[in-house]
Image (spheres, helix red, strand yellow):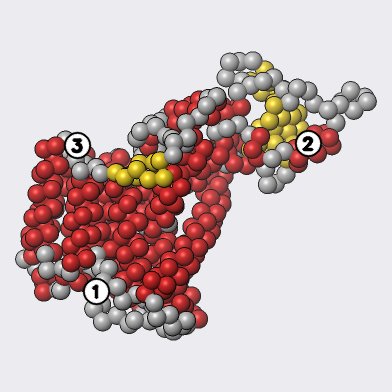
Amino acid sequence: MRDHAVAESPDTRLLNLYVSGSDARLVIFVQDGADLGPLRDRIADRYHLPHGAILLAPIEGPPLLSSGKVDYKALARAAEALKPDVQESGISTRSLLQQALRMPVLDLDRSFLELGGDSLAYLEVQMHLLTELGTVPDDWEHLPLRELMVHRRAALSALTPVRPAVQPVRADLLARVVAILAVIALHSTALPTGGGSYLLLILVGYSLARFQSGVLFEGNVLRTWRSMLVPILVCYYLLIGLIALLWYPVGAHWFMLTANFEHAVPAKGLRPYWFVSTYAQIILLFTLPFLVAPLRRRIGNRPLVAGLLALTGVVLATHLSAVLEIPSQIRQQHPLGAIELLLLGWCICFVRDLRQKVLVTLVTLFVWWFGWSDADRSTDILMLGGTMAMIWGLSVHLPVWLARGLMHVGSLTLFLYIVHAPVISIVGHLRIHSNVISFVIVTLISLVAAASFKAGYDWIDGRLSVGRTRMSAAVRN
């Protein structure tokens, strides 16, 4: 692909653009010293291309033939020799945001949260910003993306960028990592590490409040379903489908997402997947009220009060129903018990001042005493310890390498939950007698498998997003 074009820049000057490239990327040489960031935005939005596929580079003048015409062969060779790192500094961040938000075209006047970014995408973008900048603005997820890009360019252009040796890690991230590791340890060893799934359900509510509340208050429930349900369900169905085809028959209730109601679950690697059924059920139950405009406006006006009222209602309903007859060890598998924990996480996220923190602390203690105090000691520690740390906004300063490692593990939480079950079945054939060694091996293999699954899912989802955007553009035209 070879071309020469003239375009108008934001300040109305005419620019000479020399275009070369292939099906993999579009290379645009800009002669007149324009700001490449806004130009890339305009080109990507106009032709519905992903920003990662566009490479812009300055050029003093095009190579010329002896006749005085542009030497496009030389231009193509120069385009092939260019590396991605010559692009304008914001491109990698922009591409990552497009991938994380699953949006080929970003609305730069809206924030990460307003565009429906979830907790896993947040950690991914946070790691990227920390790697490049060493530090990030407080509450960057609330900034319009345009301001975030400006901050990033300013930080990168600084002569002495800040590179702190330690990084504060929030309680919700620590709780997420501890919870998933406790789940893996419970299923892969004989260690008493129950309570991880309870804490994960609380974190589901916390993540809904922090990352999806803005979308839900707008009534865009489908966006929340896509963000919260699609990644985990795609991987879940892929794995149980492979198990059914290659290993042994899988009951219909696993495919219908009702396995959490089965108390006698076979131990052949599927038992941990009750969480997927429960997770899908409570996400659907919790988000349905946001389809009703008057109701979601009331919730949006006072989300903490709404959460506390809903939590009270669910607690009463739970303990006046047959759920009371279910042992505490599996009570969280029932949607009523699970949504109780979800609502607790929702309330935790909306505490703002000391009075609210004290109130939600008392509510947490009451909920635990009224419904969960018969759980084992490990569950008590994880539920109460993790919840209190999040309510009171505790954080821990850790070495940067360790903080980023925790972020990486946290960004893989749902994928880790999906893949760790078959990994345990495979590692079980090694007949390892040490709990510690078994846990380490299962965790390391699960991390690799989860990262591979996530990369594959992101790649496929990115291709589908581009295809949907092009189809929409074709329909409009």
Residue 221, placed above or below residue 134: below
Secondary structure category for the residue under label 2:
helix
Q: Kindly state the secondary structure of the residue where label 1 is placed.
A: helix
Residue closest to the eye, 299 or 468: 299
Snapshot quadrant of residue 9: top right
Residue 343 visible at all: no
- Asked whether, in this view, residue 162 is left or right of residue 6, the answer is left
Query: What's the distance in space between the residues labelled 2 and 3, CA to CA?
Result: 55 Å
Q: Amino acid at mark 1?
A: Phe
Residue type, numbered disc 3: Arg
Q: Can you identify the residue that label 3 sits on?
A: 352
- Where does the image place residue 378, in percent across and percent down from the top left? 22, 66
Q: Determine contact: label 1, label 3, CB under 8 Å.
A: no
The residue that mark 2 highlights is 78
> How would you rate the neighbour count of disc 3 (Cα within 10 Å): few for under 14, some for 14-19, many for 20 or more?
few
Compared to residue 184, the image places residue 426 above or below, namely below
- Label 2 CA crowd tier, 10 Å (few <14, some 14–19, many 20+): some
